[in-house]
Amino acid sequence: MKNLAERSAGSLYWWLLATLFLPIAIPGLVLKLLTMMKEQRNARHLNGKVVLITGASSGLGEALAHSFFLAGCKVVLAARRKDELERVRKDLLELHATVPTHPPIILPLDLSDLNSIGSKVQSVLEIHGAIDILVNNGGISVRGDALSTAIDVDIRIMLVNYFGSVALTKACLPSMMARKEGRIVSISSVQGKFAIPHRSAYSASKHAMQAFCDSLRAEVAKDNIKVTLISPGYINTALSLNALTGTGASYGKMDAATAGGASPQDTASSILKAIARDEKDVMLAPIAPRAAYWLRHLMPSVYFWIMKKRAEKLNST
């Protein structure tokens, strides 16, 4: 009798689970399956696309070059350091010798030289006839409190991180609109979602890019142009090594948070998946930055108190 009762209780338990959760689980599974199918279809469509990547000489830009190249794209490598672009191009051709795609093109480009950007884009259009995907990845960071950061540094950060990317986007848009096809991908930061002490200039530039992309996305939807904004957390790159101090000097240090960040390769892979899923605004970050984001919006007084304590700690070191 006891075994019969236990079996009956077990049957009832599974019946209740099925009754309560199957109506939720089945639509969820169907949605996940449809998303995967869409991702695979769009990933196949990357083959042969012309992709212009800024900041392609190192870090995340270099990892993105490898990911897009492996997807069969015609990669255009853009950055200031021509010798490093040559190295990346050589690595792509040697490490992926069996990939049936086009040799990468090198495009020396300084995002702070706004007047040269139009001619740089035109040179790519003359070679490939189109730019299907623009990846605004190039940028610099800064370490310094707002008061002691020289205004020239604020201007430089905004010039490279915001105005340079905006100018490049505007130079690429006319050909995309004429073809009724294209995608703008902007690599922002979680610090474009919420600001932290000693990052005022950097966070401001990323907040600006967030706003620009949100406006642009709505405006160009009629032309079948997609806009994807990516907000990563810390990535293990040389960003902090190449960062500026408040005086404009080189920071030259590897932050512990940066050293412990996500790998550029994993981040690049996630970005390609976001593009394949046609996502619009993606945060690629662990739980702490995600919690800070929601805390900023849902419990701002708590967020402000935490940031005040963080600033006090930074100022005492």
Image (cartoon, rainbow, N blue to C red):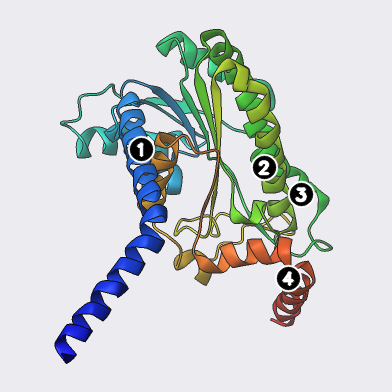
Cα separation between marks 1 and 2: 28 Å
Residue 288 percent location from the top left of the image:
55, 69
Q: Where is mark 4, residue-wise?
A: 303
Residue 190 percent location from the top left of the image:
60, 55
Secondary structure of the residue carrying numbered label 3: helix
* Camera-nearest residue between 134 and 194: 194
Q: Quadrant of residue 148?
A: bottom right
Q: Which of disc 1 and disc 4 is earlier in sequence? A: 1
* Camera-nearest residue between 9 and 248: 9
Dot 3 surroundings within 10 Å: few (below 14), some, or many (20 or more)? some
Cα separation between marks 4 and 2: 20 Å
Looking at the image, is mark 1 or mark 2 nearer the viewer? 1
The amino acid type found where label 4 is placed reads: Tyr
Dot 1 surroundings within 10 Å: few (below 14), some, or many (20 or more)? few
* Camera-nearest residue between 1 and 287: 1
Residue 264 seen anywhere in this rendered image of the structure: no
The amino acid type found where label 3 is placed reads: Asp
Q: Where is 48 relative to 154, above or below?
A: above
Label number found at residue 34? 1
Instruction: Tell me the residue at 58%/13% (across/down).
Output: 177
Secondary structure of the residue carrying numbered label 4: helix
Cα separation between marks 3 and 2: 18 Å
- State which quarter of the image contains the C terminus: bottom right
Q: Where is mark 3, residue-wise?
A: 154
Cα separation between marks 1 and 3: 45 Å
Give yes or no for contact between labels 3 and 2 (Cβ–Cβ under 8 Å).
no
